[in-house]
Amino acid sequence: MPETIGDTMDIDDGSDVDLTSIDPFWDLSVALGDLLYGLNENTLQSLSLDLGCCHPLDCSTYWIDGQKNIQSISLLTDGGCPNFASNEYLDLKSFTSIQSLSWKGLSRGDHFDCLQDFIKNQTGARGLRTLTLDLVEWNRAEKGWYDHQKATLGGFPPRPDNFFATSVVGIESDQNTVLFQSLKKLLLVGVAFAPFENEFGYCFNMMNLSTLQLRNCPSSLELLGALLEQGITPKLKSFELIIDWDCLHHYSDFEEVQTEVISPLEWYLIANSVAHHQSTLKRLVLHERGISKGEVVDGGIPWHNSGELLFHDSRLSCFGTSGPISEMESSFAELPVKPRCHILHIKMSWIDHHKKFEEEFHNIDPEDSDFDFEDFELLYESGGKFLSYPRAETFNEAVDTAQTQPSNRSPSSEPLVLTIQEPQISTRTRKIANRSDFSGPAQALLKFARWAFSSEGIPELRILAWGDFSNDGRWGESNVMLCRDQSLEPTGTNFRTLRDSDFNYWDLIDENMDMLSACSPDHLLWAKEAVF
């Protein structure tokens, strides 16, 4: 029998095998184990394993045996983990005091077995107040579950109409059982509701939710229609929907609306539906995704055709939209009534940008006299996560380039003032908005910012955000966060990048980070060739 000693395994034939070559998570298991077993029992109240990979099993028994009072659990996993790395997951049913559960990347068969056991136990499910389940993409999750069934049961087991409803949650047709009795906030991603739309509404206590977020969930409209047919006024205060929009007229008194829609024909109709909530609406996100060359990409919203409906006598403090930065100034300038928002978020997909960069890289003509292969090679081999440009400008250089008004300042005076500020950008800001390259499209952002923070722009604007702030800073290296700074007016620029020390702005950002991260245009996990 093999014996485990340190980081090697002694096999009967006398040879030593490096455990890290068998399980790449071995070192992580050892490090976590040393840390966790040094903690006092039953003292942890929050557990977050947002690793984006398989979870080391050696730690699982610790959570079950040593920490019974955990109230919040967050898991971020990858459905592409190799089988040898993990055959089972955390035993969630042991946590009976849990009030918040978030599982993103839920797509393997053993993932669903773990969640199924937790729900069947019911004690934990009944006490949940906040629940996030991100299946990434329905077809892939369904395939992952069925492959696991075949491997476990053998042969070709029958396929249910909706495996998540019947096999994982335990929903039965025509039974209106409320399983999550205490639930107030629900976020579902990639969950299909058909043919159990009515049962889902009861099971997840949707008529009593204060926050409902549905992202890329097939049959979302049918689900919302089933809720309306119950004849009970929903208690929702915050609503996010990525897929459909024509249900908005049937609800009343929303304080937040966050939607992502694919190439609508009549923006006026959407604006009219949103304006129905004008007296209560405080935060609004409208993100358009269009079709270009068969791919879904960011689109623009014609605010000059519908903005008056949204901003007249508006209470909006936060507003998120999409579209080419180069067209933003003209679009907002044409509005008879300017937004009075404190936060303006220009949303965009960095995966779109990444794909565009790859296409440009592969279509480059090496015979072109202006082509510098070393520049592109370095950019491509640096990880390829973010679109970059061969000639990178700093924020200082870009702001100076974006100047549109003549000035008597010396060329170096403005960059010097801003350079002194930049080192103060540190850990907290880097996590969500840490872009260092202000060439390319970011140059257009700074030109728009100069207008937006001016007296002719958006007078109450305090924060201008650009990018995708979903998934806890996943795209932080590409995002930009600018804030108003009146002290810089003598230099001709009254805005700058956000700092960690901007406590008044951080209070505003923290209060609205859910709005900034709403309607993510990209899947949590993405590969060049996703297998569904």
Image (cartoon, rainbow, N blue to C red):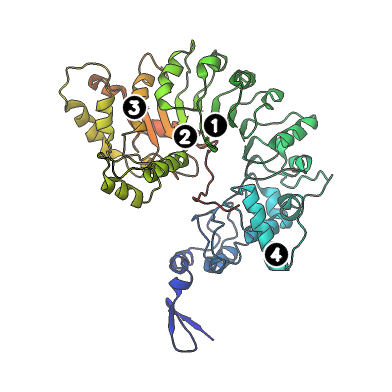
Q: Nearer the viewer, mark 3 or mark 4?
A: 4
The vertical placement of 71 against 338, above or below, is below
**Residue underneath mark 2:** 348
Are dots 1 and 2 in contact, CB under 8 Å? no
Pick out the residue farthest to the left. 410
Are dots 1 and 3 in contact, CB under 8 Å? no
Q: How far across and down, in percent of the image, does residue 250 sit?
A: 72, 24
Between marks 1 and 2, how big is the CA–CA gap? 12 Å
The amino acid type found where label 1 is placed reads Gly
Q: Nearer the viewer, mark 4 or mark 1?
A: 1
Q: Earlier in the sequence, mark 4 or mark 1?
A: 4
Between marks 1 and 3, how big is the CA–CA gap? 25 Å
Q: How far across and down, in percent of the image, does residue 445 sit?
A: 37, 28
**Residue underneath mark 3:** 446
Q: Earlier in the sequence, mark 3 or mark 4?
A: 4
The amino acid type found where label 4 is placed reads Lys
Residue ID at (24%, 31%):
397
Between marks 4 and 1, how big is the CA–CA gap? 38 Å
The vertical placement of 150 against 367, above or below, is below
Q: Secondary structure at mark 3?
A: helix
Q: How far across and down, in percent of the image, does residue 172 sit?
A: 81, 49
Q: Secondary structure at mark 2?
A: loop
User: Dot 2, how many residues are within 10 Å of its Cα: few (below 14), some (14-19), or many (20+)?
Assistant: many
**Residue underneath mark 1:** 290
Q: Nearer the viewer, mark 1 or mark 3?
A: 1
User: Dot 1, how many residues are within 10 Å of its Cα: few (below 14), some (14-19), or many (20+)?
Assistant: some
The amino acid type found where label 2 is placed reads Met
**Residue underneath mark 4:** 150
